[in-house]
C-alpha cells in the first residue's frame, strides 16, 4: 500500500470523526465504526490488481444504472428535500446509488478506453457519460450531476482524447442542453431559488439582524471561533443544519482550528500527488499495455472523484458556490460516500503498485514521503 494514501485516509477519517463528535456526539460511535470499516475495505481491495477492477467495470456500471433506475421508482428523499429521490432504503441501512455510479463510471470508461483505444470512440464514451449523468440529473441532484459529467471529461483527457475534440463535444452538448434548461428549472424551482438566494446573499444586512445568520454564516462563525488551534470537540457551540454533513469542515475548524483545516487540505494534496505519480510512471513504461493504460486512467479518475468533490464542498463552505449537498470526502457523516471514496483509494493503491512493478528496477522512484 502507498504510505502517502494511507496517511491521507487516516488524517481525513480522524478529523471527520472529530467533526462528527463536535457536531453530533450521539453519532460518534457509529462514525468510528464506519471509519474502521473504511480502512479495512481500502486495505483489502488495494491488494487486487488493476485488471480485476477493469474486468468488473461493465457489470459494475450496469448494476449502477439499475440502481439509479430503481431510485426513480422506489427511491426516497430526505426531510429537508422531500421532492427528490436520491436514496434507496433497506431497513436501517440507506444507500445513495449516485455515489457508487461515479466510481462505476470511472471503471467503465477506463476499461473501454484501455480495450478499444481513444480514436473514433468519442461517441460511445459520450453516450456512457450522458446516460449515467442523466439518471442522476432527474433525481434531481444537480451538484452530483455536474461533478459526474466533469469526471467523464477528465477521464477522456486522461485517456488521451484530444483537447480540441473534447472542446467541440462540450460545445455541441451545451447547444443541445440549452432548450431543456428552462424546462428543468421550471420543474425543480428550488434549484433556481437556491441560486438566486446565493447571488443575493448578504445584500440585505437587516435580514441578517432580524432572522439571524444563514447556514453559511453559521459555518463561518464556527471557523472564526476555532482560531489557530481550535476550541476542542467538547467546547460549547451553536448547532445548525448540516454541521456534520455538508458543512463538516466548519466543525473541523471549530474543534481543531486552522491547523485541522490545513491538515484536511494537505491530505487531499497527498491524494493528488500520488495519483499524478501513477500517470507519470505509466508514461515511462514501454510498451504501454492495456492494463497499465487502464490503471493510469482509473487512478486519475479516482483522484478527481475525491478532490473534485472536496473542492466543491470547501467552496460551498467558503461561500464561493451555492449549497449543493456534496459531502466532504471521508470527513462528512455518511456511509455511501465513505464507501465509494474508500474503494477509489484502493484503486489508486492498486494502480500505483502495478506501474511501479512494470518499471525497470533502476527507474523505480520512491514516494514523496515514503514507499512500501
Image (tube, grey):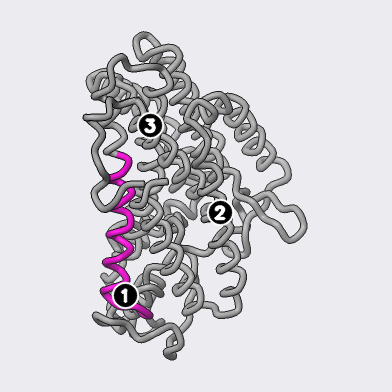
Q: Nearer the viewer, residue 103 or 115?
A: 115
Q: Quote the CA–CA distance across marks 3 and 1.
A: 35 Å
| Marks 3, 1: nearer the viewer | 1
Q: Which residues are magenta?
A: 254-275
Secondary element under disc 2, as helix, strand or loop, is: helix
First in sequence: mark 3 or mark 1?
3
Q: Nearer the viewer, residue 284 or 144?
A: 284
| Marks 2, 3: nearer the viewer | 2
Q: Residue furthest bottom?
A: 236
**Residue plotted at (41% across, 75% down):** 251
- Image height check: is 34 above or below 235? above
**Residue plotted at (55% across, 80% down):** 25
**Residue plotted at (62% across, 27% down):** 59
x, y percent for residue 249: 38, 68
Q: Quote the CA–CA distance across marks 2 and 1.
A: 34 Å
Residue under numbered circle 3: 178
Q: Could you say which quadrant of the image residue 315 lies in?
A: bottom left
Q: Residue furthest right?
A: 91
Report if the CB atoms under discs 2 and 3 are less than 8 Å apart: no
Count residues near mark 3 (Cα–Cα under 10 Å), then give few for <14, some for 14-19, many for 20+: few
- Horizontal side of 41 relative to 113 (left or right) equals right
Q: Residue furthest front?
A: 361
| Marks 2, 1: nearer the viewer | 2
**268 drawn magenta:** yes
First in sequence: mark 2 or mark 1?
2
Residue under numbered circle 2: 40
Count residues near mark 1 (Cα–Cα under 10 Å), then give few for <14, some for 14-19, many for 20+: many
Count residues near mark 2 (Cα–Cα under 10 Å), then give few for <14, some for 14-19, many for 20+: few
Secondary element under disc 3, as helix, strand or loop, is: helix
- Image height check: is 311 above or below 204? above
First in sequence: mark 2 or mark 3?
2
Residue under numbered circle 1: 220
Amino acid at each position: 500500500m502507498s504510505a502517502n494514501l494511507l496517511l491521507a485516509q487516516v488524517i481525513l477519517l480522524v478529523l471527520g470523526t472529530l467533526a462528527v463528535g463536535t457536531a453530533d456526539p450521539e453519532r460518534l460511535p457509529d462514525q468510528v465504526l464506519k471509519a474502521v470499516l473504511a480502512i479495512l475495505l481500502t486495505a483489502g481491495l488495494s491488494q487486487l490488481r488493476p485488471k480485476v477492477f477493469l474486468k468488473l467495470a461493465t457489470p459494475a456500471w450496469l448494476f449502477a444504472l439499475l440502481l439509479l433506475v430503481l431510485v426513480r421508482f422506489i427511491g426516497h428523499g430526505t426531510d429537508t428535500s422531500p421532492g427528490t429521490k436520491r436514496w434507496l432504503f433497506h431497513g436501517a441501512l440507506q444507500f445513495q446509488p449516485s455515489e457508487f455510479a461515479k466510481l462505476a463510471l470511472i471503471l467503465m470508461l477506463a476499461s473501454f478506453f484501455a480495450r478499444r483505444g481513444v480514436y473514433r470512440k468519442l461517441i460511445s464514451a459520450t453516450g456512457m457519460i450522458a446516460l449515467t449523468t442523466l439518471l442522476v440529473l432527474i433525481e434531481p441532484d444537480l451538484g452530483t450531476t455536474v461533478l459526474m459529467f466533469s469526471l467523464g471529461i477528465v477521464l477522456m483527457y486522461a485517456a488521451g482524447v484530444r483537447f480540441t475534440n473534447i472542446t467541440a463535444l462540450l460545445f455541441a452538448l451545451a447547444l443541445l442542453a440549452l432548450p431543456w434548461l428552462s424546462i428543468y428549472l421550471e420543474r425543480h424551482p428550488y434549484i433556481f431559488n437556491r441560486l438566486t438566494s446565493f447571488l443575493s446573499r448578504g445584500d440585505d444586512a437587516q435580514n441578517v439582524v432580524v432572522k439571524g445568520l444563514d447556514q453559511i454564516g453559521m459555518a463561518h462563525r464556527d471557523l472564526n471561533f476555532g482560531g489557530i488551534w481550535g476550541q476542542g470537540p467538547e467546547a460549547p457551540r451553536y448547532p445548525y443544519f448540516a454541521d456534520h454533513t455538508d458543512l463538516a469542515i466548519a466543525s473541523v475548524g471549530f474543534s481543531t482550528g486552522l491547523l485541522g483545516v490545513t491538515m484536511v487540505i494537505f491530505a487531499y494534496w497527498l491524494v493528488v500527488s500520488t495519483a499524478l505519480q501513477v500517470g507519470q510512471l505509466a508514461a515511462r513504461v514501454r510498451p504501454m499495455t492495456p492494463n497499465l493504460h487502464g490503471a493510469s486512467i482509473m487512478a486519475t479518475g479516482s483522484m478527481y472523484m475525491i478532490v473534485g468533490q472536496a473542492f466543491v464542498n470547501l467552496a460551498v463552505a467558503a461561500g464561493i458556490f451555492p449549497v449543493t449537498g456534496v459531502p466532504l470526502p471521508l470527513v462528512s457523516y455518511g456511509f455511501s460516500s465513505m464507501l465509494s471514496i474508500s474503494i477509489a483509494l484502493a484503486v489508486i493503491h492498486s494502480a500505483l503498485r502495478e506501474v511501479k512493478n512494470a518499471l525497470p528496477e533502476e527507474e523505480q522512484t520512491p514516494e514523496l514521503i515514503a514507499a512500501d
